[in-house]
């Protein structure tokens, strides 16, 4: 690194430390009190909120409409109750849930489903309410299994046929999330239909099933604050809150288990890699693997700003992610240095295993 560049970086760090509130070096320099003292330009302002004063509310003349400037955050009157003063203002409590993906519809080939960032027992009553508002009665309900069937009904778009739907609500891959899917059968309007339908794994009309799911997802998105706040179905309380993705084993035997079929698991792992911004070099669905490059983001963050400031580059290593069918679902395994290349040669066997486990944990964190 050129000497001049190194000196510039060192100077930047020194100046940053001098102006930070934790160093306290400037105040010790004679004559610098005008800069950082109580009356200085860079004085300590963290206690200013204790001297804040209330001002009267905005007075709107009677002949004007004050609706558009109503108070959005009204501060209640607390009288003369003295509260605790904080010189170090406490940080706000983190928001619960994941509002940027509260309701998401996903699709792969002929299959589609909706992911909701709420418990299945919270989503269930909203699904029932959706059909009631559509004016379609329910023929069967099994809340403990998260399943409900509609009666046979007709639509304006297809009056020559009658339709019947089965909606299933089950836990998502993440804890306290729900996954909704739809099965569909139809018959000519004059045909005799059996009381009990033999449902298959796929809807007869996949496009119609997708349209129903899209409409349900829009309805749930409008209701998001309601079903996340309080409404819970005790009838659907037997639906577990635990996600269908779980880490199992330890050390070299660690794997990610998915309680799902192969196609659904493949789509979920691929989406998790994309959301985690892990580069996919190649993929082969029939053979069941993704070839990726991965660098542990957590370790990179722990290096801090100074490591990045001095130009340390993040190093990625090759991995193969294998999906293996077992009786209980799908096992996801990360294999370090799959092709024997020199990419991971700088790592010990223990380091490679730690990075493999970190990759699986990252997939677990982003899977949906």
Image: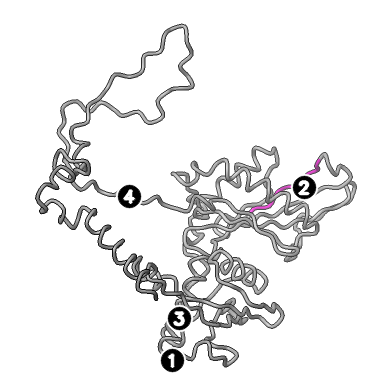
Which numbered mark, 3 or 4, is in the foreground of this view? Answer: 3
Q: Residue at x 19, y 25 (%)?
A: 79
Secondary element under disc 2, as helix, strand or loop, is: loop
> Mark 4 vs mark 2: which is more N-terminal?
4
> Mark 3 vs mark 2: which is more N-terminal?
2
Are dots 3 and 2 in contact, CB under 8 Å? no
Residue linked to disc 1: 349
Please tell me how crowded label 1 is: few (under 14), some (14-19), or many (20+) other residues with Cα within 10 Å: few
Q: Which mark is residue 152?
A: 2
Please tell me how crowded label 3 is: few (under 14), some (14-19), or many (20+) other residues with Cα within 10 Å: many
**Residue 302 in sight here:** no
> Mark 3 vs mark 4: which is more N-terminal?
4
Q: Residue at x 47, y 6 (%)?
A: 63
Which numbered mark, 3 or 2, is in the foreground of this view? Answer: 3
Q: How many marks?
A: 4
| Along the line of sight, the residue nearer the viewer: 9 or 20 | 9
- The location of residue 111, given as percent across then percent down, is 71, 62
Prevailing secondary structure class for the magenta stretch in the rendered image: strand
Q: Residue at x 24, y 53 (%)?
A: 19
Residue linked to disc 3: 355
Which numbered mark, 1 or 4, is in the foreground of this view? Answer: 1
Quarter of the image for the C terminus: give it: bottom right
Which numbered mark, 2 or 1, is in the foreground of this view? Answer: 1
Residue linked to disc 4: 93
Does the magenta-highlighted stretch encompass residue 178?
A: no
Q: Which residues are magenta?
A: 148-155
| Along the line of sight, the residue nearer the viewer: 334 or 227 | 334
Quarter of the image for the N terminus: give it: bottom left
Secondary element under disc 4, as helix, strand or loop, is: loop
What separation in Å lies between label 2 and label 1 (alpha carbons)? 60 Å
């Amino acid at each position: 690194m050129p000497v001049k560049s190194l000196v510039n970086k060192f100077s930047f760090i020194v100046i940053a430390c001098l102006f930070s509130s934790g160093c306290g070096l400037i105040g010790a320099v004679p004559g610098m009190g005008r800069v950082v003292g109580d009356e200085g330009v860079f004085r300590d302002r963290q206690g200013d909120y204790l001297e804040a004063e209330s001002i009267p509310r905005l007075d709107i003349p009677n002949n004007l409409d004050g609706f558009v400037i109503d108070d959005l955050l009204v501060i209640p009157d607390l009288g003369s109750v003295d509260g605790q003063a904080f010189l170090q203002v406490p940080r706000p409590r983190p928001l619960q849930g994941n509002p940027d993906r509260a309701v998401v519809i996903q699709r792969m080939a002929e299959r589609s489903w909706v992911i909701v960032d709420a418990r299945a027992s919270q989503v269930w009553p909203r699904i029932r309410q959706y059909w009631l508002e559509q004016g379609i009665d329910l023929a069967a309900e099994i809340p403990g299994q998260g399943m409900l069937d509609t009666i046979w009904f007709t639509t304006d778009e297809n009056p020559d046929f009658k339709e019947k739907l089965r909606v299933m609500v089950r836990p998502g891959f993440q804890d306290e999330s729900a996954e909704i899917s739809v099965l569909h059968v139809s018959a000519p309007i004059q045909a005799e239909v059996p009381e009990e339908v033999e449902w298959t794994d796929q809807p007869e009309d996949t496009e119609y099933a997708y349209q129903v799911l899209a409409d349900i997802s829009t309805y749930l998105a409008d209701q998001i604050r309601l079903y996340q706040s309080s409404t819970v179905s005790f009838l659907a309380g037997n639906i577990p809150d635990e996600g269908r993705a779980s880490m199992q084993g330890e050390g070299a035997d660690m794997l990610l288990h998915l309680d799902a079929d192969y196609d659904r698991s493949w789509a979920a792992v691929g989406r998790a890699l994309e959301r985690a911004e892990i580069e996919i070099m190649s993929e082969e669905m029939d053979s069941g693997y993704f070839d990726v490059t991965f660098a542990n983001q957590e370790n990179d963050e722990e290096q801090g700003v100074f490591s990045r400031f001095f130009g340390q580059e993040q190093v990625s290593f090759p991995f193969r992610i294998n999906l293996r069918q077992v009786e209980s679902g799908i096992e996801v395994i990360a294999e370090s240095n799959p092709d024997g290349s020199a990419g991971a040669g700088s790592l010990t066997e223990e380091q490679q295993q730690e990075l493999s486990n970190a990759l699986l944990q990252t997939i677990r964190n982003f899977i949906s």
